[in-house]
Image: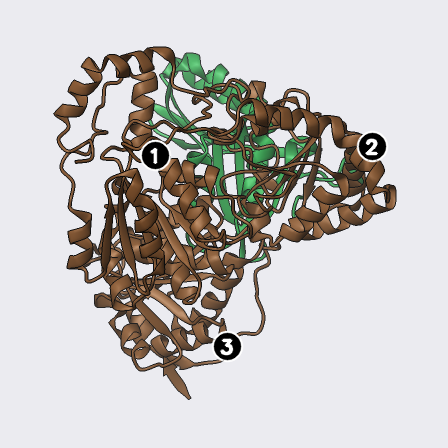
Chain colours: A green, B brown
Amino acid sequence: MEHIISVLVENKFGVLARVAGLFSARGYNIESLSVAPTLDPTTSMITIVTVGDDRIIEQIMKQLNKVVEVLSVVDHTETDFLDRETVLIKVHTKPEHRDEAIRIASIFRAKIVDSSPITYTIEITGDVDKVEAMINMLKPLGIKDLIRTGRIAIARETTRTASPRREPALLKP
Amino acid sequence: MKITGAEIFCESLRREGVKTIFGLPGGVVLKIFDVLCQRKDLQLILTRHEQGAAHMAEGYAKATGKAGVVLVTSGPGMTNIVTGLADAHMDSVPLVAFTGQVSTDLIGNDAFQEADNVGISRPCTKHNVLVKDVNDLAQAVKEAFYIATSGRPGPVLVDIPKDVSIAKAEFKYPDKINLRGYRPFTGGDKSQIKQAAEAIMTAKRAIIYVGGGAVFGDAADEVRELAEITQIPVTMTLMGLGTFPGTHELSLGMLGMHGGYWSNMAMHQADLLIAVGARFDDRVTGKLSEFCPEARVIHIDIDPTSIRKTFHAHIPIVGDVKSVLRQMNVVLRSLDGNPTAMKARRAPWLKQINAWKKEHPLVYKQDDKITKPQYVVEKLYELTKHEAIVATDVGQHQMFAAQYFKGKKPRTWLTSGGLGTMGFGFPAAIGAQVAYPNRQVVCITSEGSFQMNLQELVVAAEHNLPVKIVLLNNGVHGMVRQWQDLFYESRYSASLLGKKPDFVKLADAYGIKGLRALKPSEVDGVLKEGLKHKGPVLMDIHTDPFENCYPMIPAGGAQHEMMLEDPPELRQSRKGGAVHKRKVDEGEGVLPA
């Protein structure tokens, strides 16, 4: 099963290599990876999308926690969360396809951020279903190039949800 | 007053209580070595190869429980200690390795003797750090020792660029650790401990399975108390040997691939497994799907990743084994204070185990023609009055030593378990002897392993470290040869060592005493003379190249399906001799002269 894991780490050089190395050395998968500083400039958030059964995910969580520079690890899959990804898609736009491209972009509330005589570049932000759906719609037009940021996730605030939910699985004491 | 990075480094080591450093100099660490030679409080053991330094520091650490310290130069200096780091990482040995690095302005330029020390060592250290500013040096040293020795111990590497060792800064040794992401577990969950104690009380066929964690966790007394109040037998992994006295009536000795028949059978039929600081290594479990099929599992370990990594734990307890066992023993005593009733309850299980012991004890046949390796180990065990610190290398001799040298105390058994590093034993023995100059330190090795780090003979000679090297010389890589005999139709690919050095002459060349035993009748005399000698001794004892180590769980086999002796076809081919003898004859000098 797919899991989105947020790893809060010290913002120091070599930490990403240590986290990535842990995945490669133990044969775990990384589906996507995103890294950026947090509000506190001394820490960074690494968001990893990975796939594995319960035993593997448990090991991944424990192994991540063992890294000295890792401050906390949260598996969002166990909680209510929002995830987003931004994708830039360059589609071929023959004159007869231009309207269609604009229509698709507007259905998905995506933006056309660059245009040339032969292509449009469309920016879309959304969860995985939305992004995949738009890519599928654009495919018949011909996708020239595509780049994705990788997914990021954040837990929903408890007050906003009607039903009670479990706290994020923070393993560090 | 400002002092140089090199002075800060040495002063920080002193504050950490370091007395001995194992190392070898080089270009970028000259400043550090320059300061070092002017200090009386830090002893440097100059090794002849950096790998030797790393294993010596490991031996020192395993014997004392304190962090071993290594100091080497950049580039090849660092890459040469990688095996030692990986070994320490696998066996949880507290090690702090300081490596020189090229000046910060040259890093990344492929400078002379530059290597990515932090990158190379990342997967084989518990933690590592490059110190880019002299102001951070003292903090880095303090944290390195803290990380190496706390929690589940392990190696830490601190990379010090040349300019950092030269630059000056105010020295103030930090009194606090500032690691917000590193807080090792200690206590153990109270309700889990209670649950475990209850499981122990109701179990009929319980067994305690002790790993190296009990040695480093200093939990020998607690393990003994647990065994004695509950009357549960104790089996140990290769790394756990010494935790529980091998001579105790509840001791089952080692388990696993070459463990006793009785201990593996007991594991297989146990209804409760109490794992203490062990990690269910494949050499212990054999085929996982058939491992301990009937047992509920209590797993106590300080490292959460060890729990449920390979095998399921019904009652996991994360915490320091000493403190967890202490609490558990208190609960157990409160649950049942009656030792006689307990004894009566365990009697049928212990009787069954004893029956297994009688059915298939460890056996070998010593004749008057050729020395059996087991005989040498048993003799040595007798002659050292079971008190020596024993370091081994890796292979058959290691397994014979584990089977026949029944340790009494923790930290007297120094061996490379997880990584299986040939060449570990002799430098490790030196490290232990440096720590304890007045104790008897014996290195049981073989000519295959010994030749991987024999350059350190000169260190033993130079410092007159009375290490007793008992070299079981059988002319083959014994364990490889054994597997080839059992699983590769006796095709001895690269396992016959052919031309061998004259080890007595070699000892002589290094200025230490050399002795040789060609026949079984000479073994006793050689061992006695060697052990009595005041300085280091190399005892070259020629042993049977075709002795196999049993019991044996073939790799991937189930733990209760052990081979107990040579299979008939192997015996036949030996008796007929034709194929076998030809193969031996082709490998020159295989059989002892």
Q: Residue B396 location in percent, x, y?
A: 36, 34
Residue A118 appears in the picture as rendered? yes
Badges 3 and 1, same chain: yes
Whole-angstrom CA distance, mark 2 to mark 3, is: 53 Å
Q: Nearer the viewer, residue A11 or B17?
A: B17
Judged from the image, the secondary structure of the residue bearing numbered disc 3 is loop
Q: Find numbered disc 1 in the image and state the secondary structure of the residue it sits on.
A: loop
**Mark 3: few, some, or many residues within 10 Å (few <14, many ≥20)?**
some
Specify the label residue B372 is tagged with.
Answer: 1
Percent position (x, y) of residue B70? 36, 61
Q: Chain of mark 1?
A: B
Query: At 32% across and 42% down in the image, what residue appears?
Result: B422
Q: Are marks 2 and 3 in contact (CB under 8 Å)?
A: no
Foreground disc of the pair 1, 2: 1
Instruction: Report which residue position mark 3 lands on.
Output: B173
Instruction: Check disc 2 and give the amino acid type.
Output: Ala
The reply to whether residue B120 is in sight is no
Label 3 lies in what chain? B
- Residue B560: x, y in percent? 55, 20
Q: Is residue A96 above or below residue B555?
A: above
**Amino acid at circle 3:** Tyr
How far separated are the C-alphas under marks 1 and 2? 76 Å
Q: Is residue A33 above or below residue B136?
A: above
Question: Given the image, on which type of amino acid does mark 1 rest?
Answer: Lys
> Label 2 crowding class (10 Å Cα cut-off): few <14, some 14-19, many 20+?
few
